[in-house]
Image (cartoon, grey):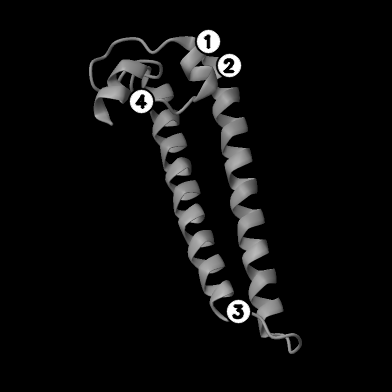
Amino acid sequence: MDTAKAHELLRMDRARTQQLLLELTARGKEDRTAADQPGDMFDSAGPLIDEGLDNSVATELQGHLAAIERAERRLEAGTFGYSIRSGVPIPDDRLEADPTAELTIEEARQAE
């Protein structure tokens, strides 16, 4: 894959992931503020469940940001687009779908 295209894919992926994380954080603050307001009775476990789900999603998003950073380091090192396990080239269509891909599809399936 062309280096400029890889940079752009990773930049767009980072921006999208950071935006999702910001929206999640803002929604969590809104939910907690609403739960603190007097008014109708509601299931008191709801906010705890929502917070747990939000934390889980935030952890996944932070993990994806770390994967983007690893991909950027591979790009700078000249190893982007090659499996970190075998060194086999990762097809461009896979990298376009997931620019953070570290393994070929076959290797990823074996890792599951």
**Label 3 vs label 4: CA separation?**
43 Å
Q: Secondary structure at mark 1?
A: loop
Which residue is label 1 attached to? Answer: 2
**Label 4 vs label 2: CA separation?**
17 Å
Residue 84 visible in rendering:
no
Which residue is label 4 attached to? Answer: 102
**Label 1 vs label 4: CA separation?**
17 Å
- Say what amino acid the circle numbered 1 marks: Asp
Residue that appears at 48% across and 42% down = 65
Q: Secondary structure at mark 3?
A: loop
Which residue is label 2 attached to? Answer: 5
- Say what amino acid the circle numbered 3 marks: Asp
Q: Is residue 111 above or below residue 80?
A: below
Q: Position of residue 40 (x, y in %)?
A: 75, 85
Residue that appears at 42% across and 24% down = 76
Evaluate if marks 3 and 4 touch, with contact meaning CB atoms under 8 Å apart.
no
Mark sitting earlier along the chain (3/2): 2
Mark sitting earlier along the chain (3/1): 1
Mark sitting earlier along the chain (1/4): 1
Which residue is label 3 attached to? Answer: 43
- Say what amino acid the circle numbered 2 marks: Lys
